[in-house]
Image (cartoon, rainbow, N blue to C red):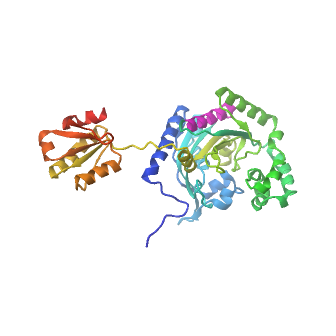
């Protein structure tokens, strides 16, 4: 019986992996320029970490998280996002004693939701977290980092910026918002009605068309910020202006997780139509303390690799896939042995090469050379082994030139 992959958990085949490698390599290069260092955390954590960190009232914890009981009767979960586990590691290993930290991560996340294009049950995120800096300059710097990263990949995205307040101003706003929404429940979709009690801020993020008139008239947190949050937002805007990062204030922009305070931001692209979000993040100054660490400000973002890969494909950007420089074609048994030796020599010199270990007819081997995208081909047989000379065939121009086998590495490298 053939066994298929799990729905919503997809294979990334060699032809696609090059694009992912590019996204991850550019991330490592850009993040290093801003002082971020890589951290790797487990894909499995205690379920309580996400209940406390992400929030029990969120859709992620309430509906989407993969939770299971292991043989030791511990309740564990596949991580649905990267921040909570990174904060857990930051606390558990005492990294806070070393002063401010800038970390980044790459890896798979898991949410049991309805699969759709660019949104899967196993998905991959690239994210950054900065700990220990309360000043708004780090907000602007991190946003600039993300703009820089997307720009280097050739992605044009709009930055939307907002403040979601803090404990000084948000509770009163939530009470006002909840009262407004409750009075209009009949005009809202079932999901919005469910969120009014559990997480009223998320109602503002609803995309259902029939809900928009109600949401357009909802009270705005941006108009009810306390002095501290207002000043923080103004300073973030000023720093972005100084850095030359364009933005648009979006009063209805919220983040879906409970730990966010003050700065919230999102980069969007119209390349995929309705699936506009490319990356998003914000400040979470109380999260470290909530998870058992000392009071420590923090800010971070995450972007989905599947969504970004789709955007790059839509933009027609071909992934930079490395192809072999040389394909060694064997004409007989002596040539096959020589091809193995020359392949080892070329690889030690840092030159990618391939050969067809099956041997076979020359025509079939040349077809394989073209299939793998080699630049040159060299036919090796007993005569070439004895003379130390062969012909180097350019598979693009079809021109052939003589080459000494001892000089092969120098010729193909040049």
Residue nearest the observer in this picture, 24 or 87: 24
User: In the image, residue 334 lies at what x, y percent?
Assistant: 15, 49
- What span is in magenta? 133-151
User: In the image, residue 97 lies at what x, y percent?
Assistant: 59, 37
Give the side of residue 400 with respect to residue 302, left or right.
Answer: left
Residue 269 is at least partly visible in this image: yes
Give the side of residue 99 with respect to residue 328, left or right.
Answer: right
Q: Residue at x 70, y 44 (%)?
A: 286
Q: Furthest-top residue in view?
A: 242
Q: Furthest-front residue in view?
A: 398
Give the side of residue 315 with respect to residue 286, left or right.
Answer: left
User: In the image, residue 43 lies at what x, y percent?
Assistant: 53, 54
Q: Residue at x 55, y 41 (%)?
A: 104
Residue nearest the observer in this picture, 209 or 152: 209
Residue 135 is at least partly visible in this image: no
Asked where in the image residue 398 lies, by quadrant, the reply is top left
Quadrant where the C terminus sits is top left
Q: Furthest-left residue in view?
A: 386
Residue nearest the observer in this picture, 154 or 86: 154
Is residue 269 inside the magenta stretch? no
Q: Residue at x 70, y 55 (%)?
A: 58
């Amino acid at each position: 019986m053939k066994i298929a992959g799990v729905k919503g958990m997809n294979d990334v085949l060699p032809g696609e992996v090059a694009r992912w490698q590019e996204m991850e390599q550019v991330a490592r290069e850009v993040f290093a320029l801003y002082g971020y260092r890589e951290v790797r955390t487990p894909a499995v954590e205690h379920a309580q970490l996400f209940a406390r960190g992400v929030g029990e009232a969120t859709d992620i914890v309430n509906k989407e998280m993969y939770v299971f009981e292991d043989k030791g009767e511990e309740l564990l979960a596949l991580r649905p996002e990267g921040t909570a586990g990174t904060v857990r590691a930051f606390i558990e290993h005492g990294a806070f004693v070393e002063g401010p930290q800038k970390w980044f991560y790459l890896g798979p996340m898991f949410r049991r939701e309805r699969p759709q294009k660019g949104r899967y049950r196993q998905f991959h995120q690239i994210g950054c977290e900065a700990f220990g800096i309360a000043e708004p300059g780090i907000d602007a710097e991190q946003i600039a980092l993300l703009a820089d990263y997307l720009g280097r990949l050739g992605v044009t995205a709009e930055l939307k910026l907002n403040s979601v307040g803090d404990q000084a101003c948000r509770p009163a706003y939530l009470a006002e918002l909840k009262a407004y929404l409750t009075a209009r429940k009949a005009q809202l979709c079932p999901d919005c009605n469910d969120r009014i009690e559990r997480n009223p801020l998320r109602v503002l993020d609803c995309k259902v068309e029939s809900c928009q008139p109600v949401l357009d008239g909802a009270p705005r947190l941006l108009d009810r910020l306390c002095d501290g949050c207002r000043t923080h937002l103004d300073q973030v805007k000023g720093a972005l202006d100084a850095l030359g990062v364009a933005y648009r204030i979006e009063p209805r922009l919220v983040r879906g997780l409970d730990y966010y305070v003050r700065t919230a931001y999102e980069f969007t692209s119209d390349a995929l139509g309705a699936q506009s979000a490319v990356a998003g993040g914000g400040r979470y100054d109380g999260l470290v303390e909530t998870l058992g660490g000392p009071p420590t400000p923090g800010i971070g973002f995450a972007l989905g690799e599947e969504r970004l890969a789709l955007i790059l494909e839509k933009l027609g950007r071909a992934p930079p896939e490395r192809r072999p420089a040389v394909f060694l074609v064997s004409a007989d048994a002596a040539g096959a042995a020589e091809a193995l030796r020359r392949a080892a020599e070329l690889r030690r010199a840092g030159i990618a090469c391939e050969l067809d270990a099956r041997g076979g007819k020359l025509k079939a081997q040349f077809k394989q050379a073209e299939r793998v995208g080699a630049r040159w081909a060299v036919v090796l047989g007993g005569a070439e082994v004895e003379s130390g000379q062969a012909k180097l065939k350019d598979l693009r121009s079809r021109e052939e030139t003589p080459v000494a086998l001892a000089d092969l590495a120098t010729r193909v490298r040049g």
